[in-house]
Amino acid sequence: MSGRTKYLLDEDSMPTQWYNIVPDLPEPPPPPLHPATGQPVGPDDLAPLFPQALIGQEVTTDRFVDIPGEVIDVYRLWRPSPLFRARRLEKALGTPAKIYYKYEGVSPVGSHKPNTAVPQAFYNAAEGITRLTTETGAGQWGSALAFSCAQYGIDCEVWQVRASYDQKPYRKLMMETYGATVHPSPSDLTESGRKVLAEHPDSTGSLGIAISEAVEKAASDEGTRYALGSVLNHVLLHQTVIGEEALKQLELAGDTPDVLVGCTGGGSNFGGLAFPFLREKLAGRMSPTIRAVEPAACPSLTRGRYAYDFGDTAGLTPLLKMHTLGHDFIPDPIHAGGLRYHGMSPLLSHIYELGLIEAVAVPQQECFSAGVRFARAEGIIPAPEPTHALAACVREALRCKESGEEKVILTALCGHAHLDLPAYGAYLAGDMIDHELPQETLEASLAALPAT
Ligand SMILES: *Cc1c(COP(=O)(O)O)cnc(C)c1O
């Protein structure tokens, strides 16, 4: 088991550009549409919600986008992040495969989310915006944005899904420590929230409802804009720092990946790791299999429809062409809160349709079993979301054990579980169940897709 375990880059070899995969694709992704006109949305439609710089990045066809110096300076707090060789997990599995993981839990909030929260806060502050609104589920995104707003001196207002607000007080306290204001969603502060509460006074909320509230607030206030932690092109763009660093680190290790796996909620940590490798694959320089892993309870890529749908429950966002389970779909309460979103990044959905990536859905007990195995071997307790990626790593590594293949497997360990330990408690106590999405539930939800 001896041998190098960590591959570290110096601060000065941090990427200075984000990578945009769009110009390297055989065809561009379909544009977002205005729900009223059915026409592609223009910059003016988005201006009440996002600063010009981010609207520009959302539609850019430049292959590379410079990272502002002010953003790099904040990235220095934790980037470059380490790449680990999981030698102890390999040994525990008895596999000839080599497993590498890019660890994003070293960020101040313990996940990959600040890779985009920092530039989003920066561009808003640079354009004179004084407050950002957003939604959060378990609180990973809300805490990342709260931290980032504090870096540039702007206010942060967060709608947190009621169930998490009540059950997981620690990330709310993190957000407040960074200076943010946190409301449970649905709230009586917005029309969208009041409408849900009128029908369901005891609603425990959903990400789709919380997005409606945050969007409504931003659209109605001049100095306020909205920030989204996943799904959109500019978010995936910012996350490519993960893959660019990993490319260099694997080169240090003298390996190229045969299989790349990552968990997908809205697609940002997966896209961030995978896109630079997909660029290399499209250029013929390597040929990894690239596999997205989603929960069986919320399987947008493997069982959703590729169709135009709203990003939120109230229908306030543009229509996005994406793999979706339907905008009013409310997933079962699995522990991986970050993977409970009805849609998938339009860019990633398009890439999946082009056949450039694969997808699998994994039940939650298998994920936590992999998470516990990983923790006992490698020490880090993975957040519930990346246990999905680890379950796929374990499957692949065990296939290699059968076949004797020495494949190189790469994954993103996109966060740690220090504030999600009750999920492990449920697993260890034998109280965890697998939620299979019934076909009738799915069909009922898909029947409510907007006509386009
Ligand atoms: C938010 C989150 C996710 C899901 O979002 P993606 O955009 O799919 O990456 C996954 N893991 C962690 C740790 C998260 O915080």
Image (cartoon, rainbow, N blue to C red):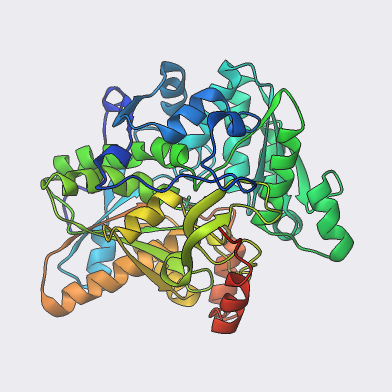
Where's residue 273, x and y in %? 33, 47
Identified at 40% across, 56% down, the residue is 349
Where's residue 437, x and y in %? 55, 78
Identified at 46% across, 72% down, the residue is 303
Compared to residue 102, the image places residue 371 above or below, namely below
* Closest to the observer, 310 or 193: 310
Q: Is residue 312 left or right of residue 359?
A: right
Where's residue 341, x and y in %? 56, 59
Asked if residue 212 can be seen in this view, the reply is yes
Quadrant location of residue 403?
bottom left
* Closest to the observer, 24 or 268: 24
* Closest to the observer, 52 or 400: 52
Q: Is residue 203 left or right of residue 49?
A: right
Asked if residue 78 can be seen in this view, the reply is no
Quadrant location of residue 310?
bottom right
Quadrant position of the C terminus in the picture: bottom right
Identified at 16% across, 51% down, the residue is 3
Q: Is residue 226 left or right of residue 107?
A: right
Numbered label tally: 0
* Closest to the observer, 33 or 279: 33
Quadrant position of the N terminus in the picture: bottom left
Compared to residue 103, the image places residue 355 above or below, namely below
Where's residue 98, x and y in %? 19, 60
Q: Is residue 273 left or right of residue 31?
A: left
